[in-house]
Image (cartoon, grey):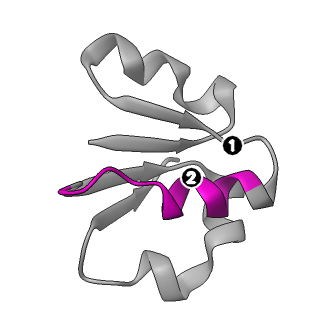
Amino acid sequence: MVAIGARTEVAGLALVGVTVLAAERPEEAVAAWAALPEGTALVLVGRAAARALGPARLDATEPLTAVLP
C-alpha cells in the first residue's frame, strides 16, 4: 500500500506500514505515481494529488485508488 499526497495528509500512515510518497506540488504527485513500486495494489491519494493525477490515472482498474477525505 502506498500513499501519495501532502506530507500533512499522508505522513501518519507510515506508522501503520504504508509507504509514503510526499508530494507537495502537482509535478511531485505525477512523479510519485510514475515511481510506484512494482506490485502496488492500493494507492491512497490526497486531494491535491488527486487533482494533479486526474481521472485517467485514478479511474484505472489497477492499482486500486482511493482519495483521502
Q: Which residue is mark 1?
A: 23
Direction from residue 4 to residue 44 in the image, left or right: left
Q: Nearer the viewer, residue 35 or 13?
A: 35
Q: Give the extent of the magenta segment.
A: 28-39
Q: Residue at x 47, y 16 (%)?
A: 12
- Badge 2 crowding class, 10 Å Cα cut-off, few under 14, some 14 to 19, many 20 or more, is many
Direction from residue 45 to residue 49 in the image, left or right: right
Where is 52 relative to 1, above or below? below
Spatial separation of the CA atoms under disc 1 and disc 2: 7 Å
Residue 62 in picture, x, y percent from top left:
24, 75
Where is 42 relative to 21, above or below? below
Q: Residue at x 24, y 56 (%)?
A: 38
Q: Which residue is mark 2?
A: 32
* Residue that extends furthest to the bottom in the rendered view of this protein: 56
Direction from residue 49 to residue 36 in the image, left or right: left
**Marks 1 and 2: CB-CB under 8 Å?**
yes
- Badge 1 crowding class, 10 Å Cα cut-off, few under 14, some 14 to 19, many 20 or more, is many
**Amino acid type at image mark 2:** Ala
